[in-house]
Amino acid sequence: MKLARIKTILIAGAGTMGQQTALLCALNDYDVVIYDISDEILAGGMERIRKNASRMTGFDLCTQEAADKALSRISTFSDLATAAGNADLVIESVPEDPAIKGRLFHDINDCCNPHTIFTTNTSSLVPSMFAEETGRPEKLCALHFHDVALSKIVDVMPHPGTSTETVEIVRQFAEDLGQIPIVLTRENNGYIFNNMLMSFLGSALSLAAKEVAPIEEIDRSWMGVMHTPVGPFGIMDSIGIDTSWKVTDYWARQRDDPQAKANAAFLKTYMDKGRLGIKTGQGFYTYPDPAFARPDFMAPQKNR
């Protein structure tokens, strides 16, 4: 199979990353089908995709004509057989649970063509955890996007059974999207950047969960020393507190780590209040005008 054969992309999951990758693929002339379990979820996902497209035109990242054409290439279905029937490449972006991912790929395998390539956008798992359930382990690898509005880095990670042809086609596909593929030679939880990021965010969560300091002070410490525009809790608001919780809770249970369990419980208090980050307007901060983005956030106390 060659890259030229890839025409239609199935995005499985209409959440934040599914929305971003759908728009990215459509802007690069691919037909995109988004699948999720309900029409209500899909309608909400499409509304946010339209808003993302509008922001891109506002920042001159694409023309209005390009945005309109991209949106016209995106369709949505809550029926999996309909959604997957013409897919040449699948990008899965569902919750960080290997059982959920395995079941989804198993069902997609029954609906799609034999040549279809499967990729997972998992943040912290590895493909071998659900490769056999796909029914085509040689055509499965990870294709992990970061925030596409901020970064062009994507991770391409095979598992031991992935064919070299699959890795090469996925690498070419990433480049065709204008991205910079980082091809790993072996599986690693969190790839490269996320592996480092999880340790960083875990440390920040531990400081907050143990009440060493308030979240704003933890962010100020990092931002002030490293001269970054955002700290760890601002980053988690961008990722989504629910996503951060899923990753933290999963590994806390897998490793039976008491501190990680406390970190997950800390995140859960925000989730229980519906404060999931930027996507809900409230997380650790309030949006669209978070405190950390204000000029006085890093000013001496007497000037705040």
Image (cartoon, rainbow, N blue to C red):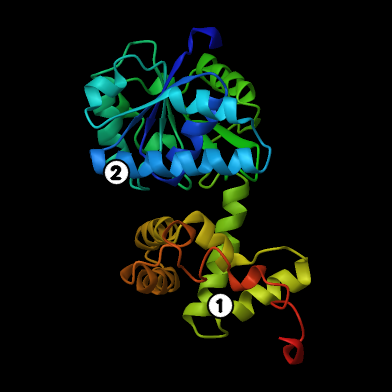
Q: Dot 2, how many residues are within 10 Å of its Cα: few (below 14), some (14-19), or many (20+)? A: some
Residue closest to the eye, 157 or 227: 227
- In the displayed structure, 101 sits above or below 232; it is above
- How many discs mark residues in the rendered view? 2
Left or right: residue 156 compared with residue 283:
right
From this view, report whether residue 210 is shown above or below residue 162: below
Inspect the image, locate mark 2, and give the three-letter code of the amino acid beneath it: Ile
Q: Which mark is residue 124?
A: none
Say if 71 sits above or below 99 in the image: above
Quarter occupied by residue 87: top left
Residue furthest front in the image: 64
Q: Secondary structure at mark 2?
A: helix
User: What residue sits 55% from the left and 11% below the top?
Assistant: 3
Residue where numbered disc 1 is placed: 215
Q: Position of residue 139 (x, y in %)?
A: 42, 20
- Report the quarter where the C terminus lies: bottom right
Residue 57, given in percent of the width and then of the height, sits at 62, 38
Q: Residue beneath label 2, please?
A: 41
- Residue 198 place in picture, x, y as percent: 55, 58
